[in-house]
Amino acid sequence: MIRREESGFMYQPSTTRLHHVGFVVPSISESIDRFAACISAPHRTAVIADPIQRVRVAFLSVSAPGQPQIELVEPAGDRSPVTRFLEQGGGLHHVCYEVDDLAEQLGYMHSVGAMVLRNPRPATAFENRRIAWVTTPDKFLIEYLEREKQRDSA
C-alpha cells in the first residue's frame, strides 16, 4: 500500500526487498571466477539463457539465502538491450527490487516522476515471474521482480 505523509510525499510500498545488483559483462564464463573471488562468493548458478530478455545471466551469492545477489548479464546477440551499454564499457547496470504488487510499484514510480522503460513480462531466470524496468528522473535504472505468489496448500 502506498502511504502519503502530511507533507504530501508518497512513500514506496513497504514490500520491496533488494533482490540483486546487475553487472553487464562481455562474457560470463570469462568473468564469473574473477567476480566470485573478489566478492568471496561461495555460491553461483548455472548460466541461464533468457530469449525473452535477449540476455544470458548467472547469479553469485555471498551469504545466506534471501540476501541480495550479484547478477552477471551478458548480451545474447546484437539486438540485446544491454549491447549498447556493454559497448560503452559495461559494468554496474541496475538494481533489482522484489515486490509483492508490480502494478502498484509501477504506479508509485510513475507518481514520483520515473518512466517505465519496459512493461511487465516474464523472465526465464526467475521461473517466468514478471519483471519491469524503470528509470528514475536521475537516470537510475531499476528492475522490479514480482514476488512469487504463495501457493495454496489445499
Image (cartoon, helix red, strand yellow):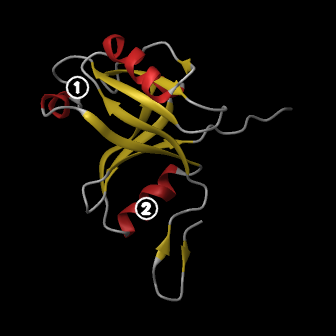
47 to 110, vertically: above or below: above
In the displayed image of the protein, which residue is found farthest to the bottom? 6
60 to 8, vertically: above or below: above
Front tag of 1 and 2: 1
Where does the N terminus fall, quadrant-wise?
Answer: bottom right
Residue 66: image quadrant is top right
- Relative image position of residue 39 (x, y in whole percent): 47, 29
Task: Rate crowding at label 1 as few (under 14), some (14 to 19) or many (20 or more) other CA atoms within 10 Å.
Answer: some
Query: Which residue is rendered at x = 43% and y = 14% of the image?
Result: 47
Disc 2 element: helix
Tag 2: amino acid: Gly
49 to 153, vertically: above or below: above
- Relative image position of residue 127 (x, y in whole percent): 54, 25
Whether residue 83 is visible here, answered yes or no, is: yes
Disc 1 element: loop
Query: Which residue is rendered at x = 36% and y = 69% of the image?
Result: 112
Q: Earlier in the sequence, mark 1 or mark 2?
A: 1
* Residue that carries the numbered disc 1 in the rendered image: 80
Task: Rate crowding at label 2 as few (under 14), some (14 to 19) or many (20 or more) other CA atoms within 10 Å.
Answer: few
45 to 122, vertically: above or below: above
Tag 1: amino acid: Ser
| 107 and 20: which is toward the camera | 20
- Relative image position of residue 63 (x, y in whole percent): 62, 32
Q: Label 1 vs label 2: CA separation?
A: 27 Å
In the displayed image of the protein, which residue is found farthest to the right? 154
Whether residue 49 is visible here, answered yes or no, is: no
Where does the C terminus fall, quadrant-wise?
Answer: top right
- Relative image position of residue 148 (x, y in whole percent): 62, 37
* Residue that carries the numbered disc 2 in the rendered image: 107
